Structure formats: C-alpha cells, structure tokens
Amino acid sequence: MNPRIYPHPFFAREGWPIIGGAAAVTVLLWLFGWSFLAFLALIVTLFCAQFFRDPARELPSDPRAVVSPVDGRVCKVQKANDPLTGAECTMVSIFMNVFNVHSQKAPVAGTVEEIVYTPGLFVNADLDKASTDNERNAVRVTTEDGRSVTFVQVAGLVARRILCYAKIGQRLERGERYGFIRFGSRVDVYLPPEAEITVSIGDKVTGVMSTIARL
C-alpha cells in the first residue's frame, strides 16, 4: 500500500472529536445510572464511528482507469460544461448517503491548477440543482498528458462542512486522499469528452477500487 496515498488512520481524524465526545457522554450517562440514555448515546457513538471510517483501498491495475472519488451511488451521467473552464465534458455524479465513507480521493493523478470554493445552499445533494445551488468546492487538475479533470465536492442536506486539503501546484496521485465532507453529500467528476464512461445511473461504486471511466 502506498504510504502517501494512505497515511491516515482507519477512523478519520475529522471524526475523532465527535466520536470521542459521543463515547464520553455514553460513559458518563452509564456511570450516573441513566442506562436508557446511555444506550441511545452508544447508538450515536457507533453511528459516528461507522460514518468516519476511512479504510485503505487497492487501486485498479489499469493505468487508464479513472477511479471513483467516493463510495456511493451514481446519480447522474451526462454531457455538461466544466464549472471552472467552461469546456464541454462528461459529468459523472456520485451521491453519498450517511452510511458511505465520506473522505474524498483524487480520481486521476495530476497537478492542481485551480481550487474554487463557492458558498451556497444545503438542499438534498441527490437533486439536479445541488450542483449549481449548494455549497461546493471544485478542484481542477491537469494530467501528465495535458488533460483537464475537475472534481467537485458538493454539500448536502445534512452536510454543512466541506474540507479540502489540496493546494494549488500540488501533485495529487490517483487515489490520494484530498478532502472530507461531513454527512450526506456528493461528488461531481467532469471528464474530457473522449473519456470512456464505464458506469451507469444507479450503479453502486466503491471509492478508489471502482473504475468510473477510462482516459
């Protein structure tokens, strides 16, 4: 396993304060004899633990593979315009529910050219207008062969915090962790028109392990 791509623990650091706080409340309620409330707090703790899990994943062997940036369900495959360059492209959108892993991985290797954060609403991320109306963060990279690929973190109905650790000028490796969205949300990937799309609407994908397209 590449230590650069997976330097993070199984439970994402973004969730440590939340998991720890919920566990502490569970213990305190149990010590004070409030067993029913302690049981409810335990359920919350377990939910937070599963939400913030971030297991290591194996990359596909195909060097042309564009990997899924997240776990989830493909909710849109369509012609679109890159939100940063305006160029014609194909968009693959993946919706994450609260039971999916919510860290984001780079779908392709490349140099980060632009990062644009846009404040917005928090409508259901499964809706079409989420791509244009919701809070979102776009990262555009240029691959070694000069192709431009943009991937956009989109906040959802519950998600209200987008974290992005990529920096302009940084080289991201395919499958490298670059961000996190807390709770339900989605990621839109804008690919060159010649990309061979390998998923369809409704397909379930696994972050890094699933191939969504080939370049």
Image (tube, rainbow, N blue to C red):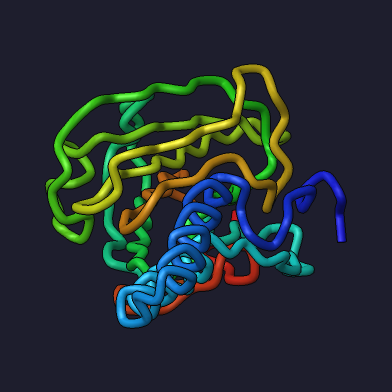
Q: Residue at x 28, y 66 (%)?
A: 75
In this rendering, the answer to whether 119 lies above or below 58 is: above
Q: Residue at x 53, y 55 (%)?
A: 69
Instruction: Name the spot of residue 119 as percent of width and height, x first.
Output: 24, 26
Q: Quadrant of the N terminus?
A: bottom right
Foreground of the two, 125 or 211: 125
Please identify the residue farthest to the front as the structure is shown: 32
| Quadrant in which residue 53 is drawn | bottom right
Q: Quadrant of the C terminus?
A: bottom right
Instruction: Name the spot of residue 105 as percent of width and height, x first.
Output: 59, 50
> What number of labels is visible?
0
| Quadrant in which residue 29 is drawn | bottom left
In this rendering, the answer to whether 178 lies above or below 91 is: above
Left or right: where does residue 13 sit relative to residue 94?
right
Foreground of the two, 194 or 154: 154
Q: Is residue 36 visible?
A: yes
Left or right: where does residue 49 sit relative to residue 47?
right
Instruction: Name the spot of residue 163 as percent of width and height, x first.
Output: 47, 35
Q: Is residue 72 visible?
A: no
Q: Residue at x 25, y 35 (%)?
A: 135
Left or right: where does residue 70 sit relative to residue 3?
left
In this rendering, the answer to whether 71 lies above or below 92 is: below
Foreground of the two, 148 or 73: 73
In this rendering, the answer to whether 165 lies above or below 44 is: above
Instruction: Name the spot of residue 168 as percent of width and height, x first.
Output: 60, 18
